[in-house]
Image (spheres, rainbow, N blue to C red):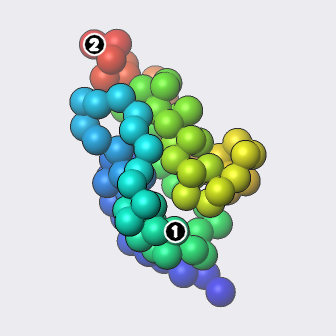
Amino acid sequence: MLKFIGGTTLHNGMGFMYEASYATMGPEKLDLFRRSYNDLHFITVDEVSMLAPDKLYDISKRLCEIFISGDAFANKGILFVGDPMQVNRVNDM
């Protein structure tokens, strides 16, 4: 069954803090994400040109944390879309 959960920002959807380094989630927040993403199979990330390269590692770490996995991106499908040549990444400006 295909289920759409709606769109959100990368930071909100992955529990990242703006302008902060990666931080693991507390147990309550982690439990909330596990229940919310229980049926997650793949993620679509739009506007890939706005994504800093180190954020890929953060996405993988967060998914592994949520799904208790040691595999890259917790074996979830990731679809990156957008025009990578559209603009420079935020950190490169």
Q: Nearer the viewer, residue 34 or 26?
A: 26
Q: Which residue is mark 1?
A: 34
- Quadrant in which the C terminus appears: top left
Mark 2 residue crowding within 10 angstroms, few (<14) / some (14–19) / many (20+): few
| Residue 54 point in image, percent of width and height | 49, 25
Residue type beneath disc 2: Met
Residue at x-position 74% and y-position 46%? 71
**Residue extending farthest top:** 92
**Residue extending farthest bottom:** 1
Circle 1 sits in a helix, a strand or a loop, which is it? helix
Q: Which residue is mark 2?
A: 93
Residue 87 can be seen, yes or no:
no
| Residue 69 point in image, percent of width and height | 70, 52
Q: Is residue 55 above or below residue 59?
A: above
| Residue 38 point in image, percent of width and height | 57, 74
Give the foreground label among 2 and 1: 1
Residue at x-position 25% and y-position 30%? 19
**Picture quadrant where residue 43 is located:** bottom right
Disc 2 from disc 1: Cα separation: 36 Å
Residue at x-position 46% and y-position 73%? 36
**Picture quadrant where residue 8 is located:** bottom left
| Residue 45 point in image, percent of width and height | 48, 48
Q: Nearer the viewer, residue 83 or 43?
A: 43
Mark 1 residue crowding within 10 angstroms, few (<14) / some (14–19) / many (20+): some
Count of marks placed on residues: 2
